[in-house]
Image (cartoon, rainbow, N blue to C red):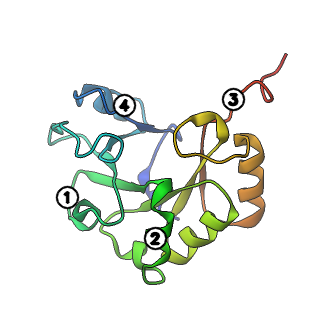
Amino acid sequence: MNAIEKLNLSIPIIFVNPYFNVSFDLIASVYKLGAIGVIDHVTAGASRISPDGKTPYGIRCRISDPLIKTVNDMVRLAIVPIDDSEALADHEDGELSLAPFPVMVEVANIEDLRIAEKAGACGVIARGAECGGWASKTHGFVLLQQILQSSKLPVFLQGGVGPCTAAG
């Protein structure tokens, strides 16, 4: 069983809470549905969300953030943002696998994928061109296929629906 399977998601969805939402209620609701909600500590700095102490959740934080090494019984997943790939490349091989919970890495291309694999990521989030912010120049469905052909890591897709991919 890989680290992503250990998350025991009945719905394979990772929901990253919008930075402007400061309520934990949405993350708790996502968890009740069988997915996992993630508190974003990157987009707008440290989140002001206060977890409820009984609902498991994930965190999105920089590789340099102490949260990534902090043991917390409710944190089930960490996500390293796409713009941390240079910092991640400087870390020891397999270092992410030493974290107290599974760590996924956002990727935009095969080079980012290789950095994530070398660092010990348990999975990746492919950020297709449609998702906004730091993202790939490649459309999500194409990026997903490239990554699936190049790696055995579990892959989640962010983005993916755009004018070139919608059915007509």
- Residue denoted by label 3: 161
Q: CA distance from mark 4 to mark 1?
A: 22 Å
- Residue 65, given in percent of the width and then of the height, sits at 27, 62
Q: Who's the residue at 50% across and 54% down the image?
A: 82
**Which tag is nearer the camera, tag 2 or tag 3?**
2
Point out the tag, 4 or 1, that comes first from the N-terminus.
4
Point out the tag, 3 or 1, that comes first from the N-terminus.
1
Q: Which mark is residue 88?
A: 2
Q: Which mark is residue 18?
A: 4
- Residue 112, given in percent of the width and then of the height, sits at 60, 64
- Residue denoted by label 1: 72
Q: Quadrant of residue 78?
A: bottom left
Q: Is residue 35 left or right of residue 148?
A: left
Q: CA distance from mark 2 to mark 1?
A: 22 Å
Q: CA distance from mark 4 to mark 3?
A: 19 Å
- Work out which residue is located at the far right of the displayed protein and give it: 168
- Residue 44, given in percent of the width and then of the height, sits at 30, 40
Q: Which amino acid type corresponds to the residue marked 2 in the rendered image?
A: Leu
Q: Residues within 10 Å of mark 4 (few under 14, many from 20)?
A: few
